[in-house]
Image (spheres, rainbow, N blue to C red):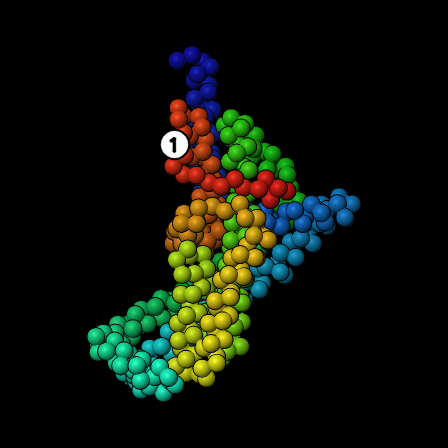
């Protein structure tokens, strides 16, 4: 080996070793840093406008934006998540107590009180209960497992209160400096990646578009669906409306059923336990909810062409949650968008006749401005 080759090998060996050590140092703060990156990416267009309005004073603008993100996003979401977890534990306890008291066996008598369809439904429900005689035991055991899991998670959060507080301040600290120094950090990262310029442009463009389109559009649409559904549950007197609203928001990402997987059982519950008009209202609100949110709100937020493949998006969101925790709901689709960009580069540069097995609709280039 020549002296130049030895020098280059030594340099890159040192570079890899130092990169590994730095990543290990940053690892405990990875989740709050990722939250900060997502929030800043979403709010950065507002930051640029505010920076211009305040005469280019970056410190003041960054502080105002950090306080704004804290007030508008972080605190309300943390409060709602806490409520949802608490309600979920209470919900499983309530369901377990109802089943143990013989609630399933009483279903035929309850259904018999319905006007017009009561007698027919009573027979159907009766045969269903007889066919699945061990269903009450299964529900009780499942409820115990889920309730124990949720209680364990709550206890873990209480024990790790200091770690949560640390992550919270790390996220706020990171948000401030990403707002203030975001352009410079972006340029440094762009220049440091050893790839062809057009490849880097495609990957960075897809990252920005995916965060904007998926998080601002698809995820916010799901949150809006969950919020409207939760309000409907609360107004109709359904128990645990925050928990059911949160479940509705998560299932709104599913291409199969969506929020109907929640509001249809809720409507059935209202038919059982409340005046019939409440069940009818629930069906009307739920049925209109999906169409309005999917066909009006989402196109307004992201445009009709700015969508990842729905099936891939669904699995990326749920798989992201399983692998990364709650942030995976956002991180999974972002990584999916970057992966599809890499696939596109591979098809263009390394295949004589690109197969386009994974075809993604063109994203509106104005979304990230």
Assign a secondary structure to mark 1.
loop
Q: Position of residue 19 (x, y in %)?
A: 47, 35
The residue shown at (52%, 73%) is 232
Q: Position of residue 220 (x, y in %)?
A: 54, 57
Q: Is residue 235 visible?
A: yes
**Quadrant of the snapshot with the N terminus:** top left
Q: Nearer the viewer, residue 236 or 202?
A: 236
Residue that protrudes farthest toward the top in the picture: 2
Q: Is residue 350 left or right of residue 124?
A: right
**Quarter where residue 144 is shown:** bottom left
Q: Position of residue 155 (x, y in %)?
A: 41, 67
Q: Is residue 71 left or right of residue 17?
A: right
The residue shown at (49%, 41%) is 361
Q: Label 1: which residue?
A: 355
User: 126 above or below 228?
Assistant: below
User: 291 above or below 10?
Assistant: below
**Quadrant of the snapshot with the C terminus:** top right
């Amino acid at each position: 080996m020549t002296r130049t080759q030895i020098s280059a090998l030594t340099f890159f060996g040192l570079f890899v070793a130092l990169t590994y050590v730095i990543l290990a140092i940053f690892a405990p703060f990875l989740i709050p840093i990722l939250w900060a990156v997502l929030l800043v990416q979403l709010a950065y267009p507002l930051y640029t406008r505010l920076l211009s309005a305040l005469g280019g004073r970056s410190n003041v603008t960054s502080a105002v934006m950090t306080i704004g993100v804290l007030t508008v996003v972080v605190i309300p979401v943390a409060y709602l998540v806490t409520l949802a977890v608490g309600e979920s534990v209470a919900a499983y306890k309530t369901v377990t107590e109802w089943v143990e008291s013989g609630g399933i066996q009483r279903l035929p008598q309850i259904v018999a009180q319905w006007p017009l369809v009561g007698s027919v439904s009573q027979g159907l429900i009766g045969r269903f209960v007889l066919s699945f005689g061990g269903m009450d035991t299964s529900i009780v055991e499942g409820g115990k497992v889920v309730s124990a899991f949720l209680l364990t998670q709550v206890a873990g959060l209480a024990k790790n209160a200091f770690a949560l507080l640390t992550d919270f301040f790390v996220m706020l600290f990171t948000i401030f400096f990403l707002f203030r120094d975001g352009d410079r950090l972006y340029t440094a990262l762009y220049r440091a990646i050893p790839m062809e310029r057009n490849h880097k442009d495609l990957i960075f463009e897809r990252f920005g578009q995916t965060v904007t389109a998926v998080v601002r559009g698809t995820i916010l649409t799901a949150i809006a669906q969950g919020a409207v559904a939760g309000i409907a549950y609360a107004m109709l007197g359904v128990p645990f409306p925050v928990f059911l609203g949160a479940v509705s928001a998560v299932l709104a990402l599913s291409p199969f059923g969506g929020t109907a997987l929640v509001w249809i059982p809720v409507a059935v519950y209202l038919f059982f336990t409340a005046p019939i008009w409440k069940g009818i209202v629930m069906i009307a609100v739920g049925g209109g909810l999906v169409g309005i949110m999917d066909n009006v709100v989402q196109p307004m937020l992201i445009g009709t062409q700015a969508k990842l493949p729905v099936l891939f998006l669904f699995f990326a969101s749920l798989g992201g949650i399983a692998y990364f925790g709650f942030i995976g709901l956002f991180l999974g689709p972002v990584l999916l968008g970057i992966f599809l960009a890499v696939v596109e580069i591979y098809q263009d540069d390394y295949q004589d006749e690109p197969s386009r097995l994974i075809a993604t609709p063109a994203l509106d280039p104005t979304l990230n401005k």
